[in-house]
Amino acid sequence: MFSRLKSNRGLWLAALVCGLVQPFCHAQQDADAPITVEGTVVDGVSHQPIARVLVNAHEDATLTDNDGHFELHLPAGDTLIELRRPGYHMPGHETATLAVGNSIHIAAGMAPLSFTLIPFGSISGRVTLAADDDPDGVRVNLYAHHVVKGYLRWVLTKSVETDSEGAFRFGELPAPADYLLQTEPVHHEAASGRATSTGYGTQYYPGVTDAEAAGTLTLQPGQQAESDFQLARQPFYPVTILPAGPAEQSGYGAIVLDAAGRRVEESAHWNPARGALELSLPNGRYRVQVRGREAVGSVDLTVAGAPITTRASVLPLAPLQVRVHREFDPKNGNGVGIMGGGDDSIIAAGVLITLIPDSMFIEEPSLMFLHHVSKSEDADLYEMPGVLPGRYRLVARPLSGYINSASQGGAELGSEFLVVGAGGAAHPIEITQRGDGGTIEGTVHDGANGQPASGDGQGASAPAGGQAANRAQQEKVFVYFVPQFPTVQEMQWDIAGEGAFKHRGIPPGSYQVLAFDTPQDISPSDAQQMAQFAGKGQTVKVEANGTAHADLEVIHTSGGSAGGSGSQ
């Protein structure tokens, strides 16, 4: 009897507990249940839906249907959604091989998402040679107009060879953007007993040999542009260069640049018997850099219908000296302190220097590390090894504080060139760092809807019913601080969070503050480009240790850069 009562009591308690807990259990199950997230992907040019876009949220993935529609089942909270589709890129993210994530906040009742993809452009064409020459294998180079550390340059983007029909194609090109096309020389060896050889010289689109006269091809999103080359056979004349300087056991080599500073793919042969560099070039103006293991030099020459023999002075490659004056304690400076330790540290100077050649073209910017001068009693004296003769723009990035000034022999490098001779520079570079930088803070508003720009990396989750679709790609706002004064310091930028930003360590001075919906390619030194931003953003003045305020409206760029084609 007792056993039976005990058993019934257990059943009663179990039923009571189950009754009390069941609502909580159901609520917990509902909270953990996936949320259905719907959306569409459209073409940013045609505004038509895009089918077969891979929409990947990691927890779930799918392909869009013929109407550009997709449906995901995701847990509540923040997640990254990536989009992939051959022939398209995300606005402001032009790298074809990279999937860029959109940070989205998933919540019950959220409105449908809306994504935009920008179609890549393409350039194709044909190279025609003389009737009896095979057009197969002619190298065609494509240059894009990029801002490199604040300076506009033509940067080699892609290089292809023509097929047996002379055809070539550059696909998946970011747009809108400016491009320049050029063919490499095709040199045929001279016949036996003849000094002059023949071939095809460099040509720039549309059919000119001078880079400064080359045409710029402005490619729009989705555009399939065409550009053809018709090359004429011409003589290549012998060029002999006699290096005058230290003897090099292994001889000298040469790099040939055309009048615009673009490297010409023409090999030079070292003749040890004559102590001379030998090469062949078509008519034109060139600069030949003569390089040995420990000595360098250069010579400017013009080929005009006849062979040339000339001399080039070569001198030992001396390191460039830099003196860094710190007018603050790096450990307490206004900025990010990542100072190196000890004389052997390549970042002990507290500043990184990039040299941008004075040329239309650039292969790669030269990042120079500073080393203490060996056995020097001057603790502030450093050196940069391996700087070739030439004119450069100097760009500095402080590891702490800010760059107050940079000069060489009285020349202010914020507005003048750094000049390096064959034997180095006559005067050291003098750089002064300070730690009393100011702050620029402010708010960012989206004029399209009058609301603060989210800028927090999260797409807004609007309640269902009468709400517009989420603009999931406008969650980031890029804020740029464009100096209105000459400076060698690299231009600073930030990302606004929740409609606000606060950037510290700004050098004192006036700035034009601009906010964009996509990353930008801004060159403060380019007057034509900066004219596009006249009257936009807000100009503020930053005092030492002070704070300036800016109230900005987002500049919409429709998926393209408002000032260029890309940055480095």
Image (spheres, rainbow, N blue to C red):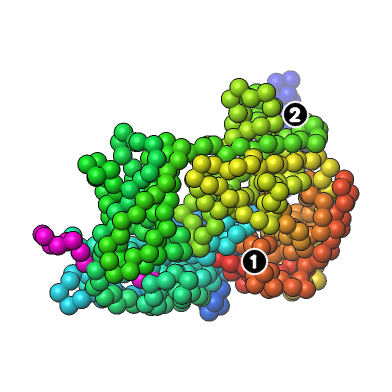
Is 289 or 8 nearer to us in this picture?
289
Q: Amino acid at mark 2?
A: Arg
| Residue 273: quarter of image | top left
Q: Position of residue 480 (x, y in %)?
A: 72, 59
Residue bearing mark 2: 9
Is 298 or 207 nearer to us in this picture?
298
Q: Which quarter of the rendered picture does the C terminus lie within?
A: bottom right
Q: Residues within 10 Å of mark 2 (few under 14, many from 20)?
A: few
N-term mark: 2 or 1: 2
Q: Residues within 10 Å of mark 1 (few under 14, many from 20)?
A: some
Cβ atoms under marks 2 and 1 closer than 8 Å = no
Foreground: disc 2 or disc 1: 1
Mark 2 secondary-structure assignment: helix
- Which residues fall within the magenta stretch? 190-204
Relative to 252, 540 lies left or right: right
Asked if residue 190 can be seen in this view, the reply is yes
